[in-house]
Amino acid sequence: LAVDALAGANFYFGILFDSLSLLITVALLGLFTNMSFEAVQIFGGMPFLLMIFFSTTFSPGAGIQGLKNMRYLFARFYLWCMVPGYGELMEGCPENNTLLYLILASLTVPILFVCYKGVKALCNKAKGAKA
């Protein structure tokens, strides 16, 4: 492992989007819903808790077969794949475009949230048109 192996722009953006993936849920729920503060904290912490619960699937050979595929939903998995010396040991790491997969995994919650709000707005609009 070289001294400056983690100094590239890829790792900067990898760590940035990894942190974003864990914090964006709190921001979206707090700003765009009518939930109480406590509910925002509980549901906003779910991505972090799920990542901890499924973190054993990051280990080579570990995890239950069905749950093992959940690791691809978390940006932290792809961040570990980018670290020299660890990416070679982990199962299922992409050969290339790891940063792209990391960014897409970190944007899963915002995309699902926008889709939910869009469907909810369309349903409310359809109800208003019928009335």
Image (cartoon, rainbow, N blue to C red):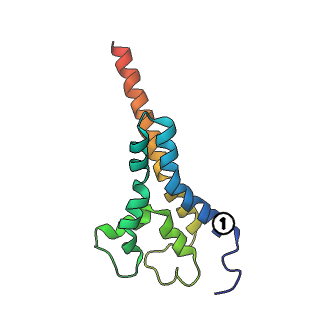
At x 52%, y 82%, the residue is 86
- The quadrant the C terminus occupies is top left
Q: Is residue 27 visible?
A: yes
Q: Does dot 1 land on a helix, a strand or a loop?
A: helix
Q: Which image quadrant is residue 10 in?
A: bottom right
Q: Nearer the viewer, residue 126 or 6?
A: 6
Q: Which residue is mark 1?
A: 12
Q: Residue 14, relative to residue 28: is it above or below?
A: below
Residue 55, by quadrant, is bottom left
Measured along the vertical axis of the image, is residue 39 above or below residue 58? above
Q: At which x and y percent is residue 28?
A: 50, 43
Q: Is residue 97 left or right of residue 93?
A: right
**What residue is rendered at 59% in x and 65% in y?**
99
Q: Residue at x 36, y 67 (%)?
A: 54
97 or 14: nearer the eye? 14
At x 58% / y 59%, what residue is drawn? Answer: 17
Taking the image as shown, residue 10 lies to the left or right of residue 76, namely right
Query: For this view, does 64 lie left or right of residue 82?
Result: left
From the top left corner, tell me how far across and down residue 127 is, in percent.
34, 20
- Lateral position of residue 118 relative to residue 63, left or right: right
Residue at the far bottom in the pictured view: 1
Task: Bin the neighbour count of mark 1 within 10 Å (Cα to Cα): few under 14, some 14-19, many 20 and up.
Answer: few
Q: Three-letter amino acid code at disc 1?
A: Tyr
Quadrant for the N terminus, please. Answer: bottom right
- In the image, is residue 62 above or below residue 110? below
Q: Residue furthest top?
A: 131
Whole-percent x and y of residue 15?
Answer: 60, 65
